[in-house]
Amino acid sequence: MTRLGLVSDVHASPEPLAAALELFAREGVDQVICAGDIAGYGDALDPTVDLLRAAGAASVQGNHDRWFLARRDPATAATRAWLEALPTVLDRRIGECRLYCVHASPPRSLMEGIRLLDEHGMPEPGARADWDARLADLDADLLVVGHTHQLFAERLGGTLVVNPGSTLFNRSCAVVDLPSLDVRLLPLPGATARAVWDWRGGWTRDLA
């Protein structure tokens, strides 16, 4: 068995990321996967990247990472080089399973996120059927995405799709066991996980 720890949208905020990594250590995670947006919102990018590097996290770029690099915002040379070297897609085999990770949606979008919930954390009408069809040809067992600040694990188009939510905004992460594809959506220690963090209204309903 391989146990994956999933995070996303850490947004230059090391404290919630550190809490997720501590939880992963207790859970016996073998590999940490980060679905992008390491930069943005927060103001502590260097220590956030240091945590991901120390954890050996396999990460992809998000839209905020691209914007950060384009603006030439302040950061150490090591942080900038690490972000610039990140791929937009992770596509790898782990034992019997194929993992595909992209920030927003396949094949390599950084902006068109898989949004299954509305701003109140309720199912978005037609969204599940739409993504069921759009992901029907994706040859992957596990798809890991972020971007939308929505926390879910759903089978779409024959693939288990997991968005671990934002460590900063949803206060959440996820653990997935391979090859069984057993998934747990977890609150950060001492926090309540939120199903959605919507830009228009902030926090919405707690995760049931």
Image (tube, grey):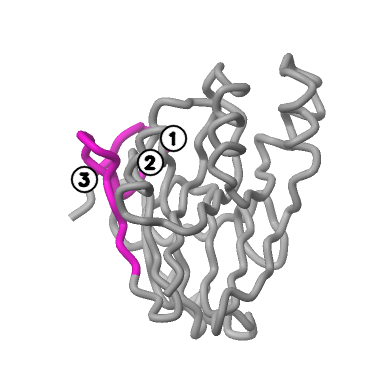
Q: Residue 21, relative to residue 14: is it above or below?
A: below
Residue type beneath disc 2: Ala
Magenta-drawn segment? 183-206
Q: Is residue 167 left or right of residue 42?
A: left
Q: Residue 22, relative to residue 156: is it above or below?
A: above
Q: Report if residue 191 lies within the magenta region.
A: yes
Q: Please report whichever mark, 3 or 2, sits nearer to the chain's N-terminal start.
A: 2
Front residue of 110/131: it is: 110
At x 61% / y 38%, what residue is drawn?
Answer: 53
* Residue that mark 1 sits on: 17
Total numbered badges shown on the rendered structure: 3
Q: Residue 142, relative to residue 18: is it above or below?
A: below
Q: Secondary structure at mark 1?
A: helix
Residue type beneath disc 3: Asp
* Residue that mark 2 sits on: 20
* Residue that mark 3 sits on: 206
Report crowding for label 1: few under 14, some 14 to 19, many 20 or more residues within 10 A (C-alpha).
many
Give the image location of residue 137, x and y in percent. 64, 85
Q: Distance between the Cα atoms at labels 3 and 2? A: 18 Å
